[in-house]
Amino acid sequence: MEKRSIQAGNIFGLDRKELEAIAVAQAHPGYRGRQLFRALYSRRVRNFDSITELGKDFRESLAGRYRIDYPSVERTYESSDGAVRYLLGLEDGRRVETVYMPDKNRTTVCVSSQAGCAVDCQFCFTALRGLERNLSPGEILGQLYILLEAGRELPKARLNVVFMGMGEPLLNFRSVMKAVQVLGDPEGLGIPLRRITISTAGIVPGIVKLGREPVRPKLAVSLNASRDQERTALMPLNRKYPLGELLAACRSYPLRPWERLTFEYVLLDGINDSDSDARRVVELVRGIRCKINLIPYNPGPGLPYRPSPLARVLAFQQILTRRHIPAFIRISRGQDVSAACGQLRLADATGSSLLDQVPDLHSPMA
């Protein structure tokens, strides 16, 4: 009930059908809702008076019933590598984070789907916060629109949007998919679906459900261990969805002709980074058209893990590639402002970077 009352009156985040229904309910043709959709999401209008294609009476009626609100920017943290971590305030006083990562060949935006997270991965700082609530479609979309409003460049042909921020996207399925539909709509932001990625800790029913969606982004699955015992220790969710069940869902996932499933593997020193782990990973993913992103751990105070040494990361990668598994070392951006993978926690803590050690090996986010 709380989310419904918070969002009452905010029209930003409603989809095309909902906007058409608003038009019809106010005795206007349905196509007026489509015009409203284009104004909100393509033209990024922030007040109803500017939607001049709508009649004055409809504009006044909308202004009396609704608002067009984005999250508010409370603070930004700029990294030496160009990434920017945005601390955003929501209407109920809760906060989430978004990371903007420009590069010469692409721009990546890492968005949050929940305030906090319930999955409780033991190496992730967001897990320390716990779950506060799901984000609405408008709060998810607003993370990109606030960047546009701030003048950040989001080039459609070179933009990757990754649901790898706070929260587990598949536990907020409806809101995430509504946001994805607006992001991918040519009359919305028009981002190609192959440039949008949902990352999951392994919610098996959500993976199955996503595979049935007619309009869907790419899928990335956090693997992070090669045996159930180790994965359960790192990711308690594995008790409910163990590796056998998770990999079965991945094998059944309906990949499109151009698509590979992405597996993410955070490398933790002495925990999951041995040669034996790498060989077991090869067996786990055998027969799946996939790639593996190897992610050196992003450390910080409060958790006991250390990143694997570079030599160990390279050895792990070599075992995979020799067995024809595409494997890429993905160095996270924004480590010095706690903007890297697993570091989002509304804090000022900083970490160290491996970028200087591997200038030619870091791979794209998508």
Image (spheres, rainbow, N blue to C red):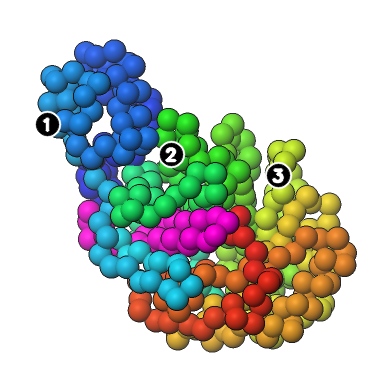
Label 2 sits on what residue type? Answer: Leu
Q: Which mark is residue 259?
A: 3
User: Where is mark 2, residue-wise?
Assistant: 189
Label 3 sits on what residue type? Answer: Glu
Q: Secondary structure at mark 3?
A: loop
Label 1 sits on what residue type? Answer: Gly
Label 3 vs 2, first from the N-terminus = 2
In which quadrant of the rendered view does residue 127 lie? Answer: bottom left
In which quadrant of the rendered view does residue 222 lie? Answer: bottom right
Quadrant (top left, top right, bottom left, bottom right) of the C terminus = bottom right
User: Closer to the observer: label 2 or label 1?
Assistant: 2
Determine whether 152 is above or below 156 in the image: below
User: Where is mark 1, residue-wise?
Assistant: 64
User: Distance of mark 1 from mark 3, alpha carbons?
Assistant: 46 Å
Residue in the picture at 57% in, 46% down: 195
User: Closer to the observer: label 3 or label 2?
Assistant: 2
Query: Residue 108: within the magenta?
Result: yes
Residue in the picture at 73% in, 57% down: 291
Q: Secondary structure at mark 2?
A: loop
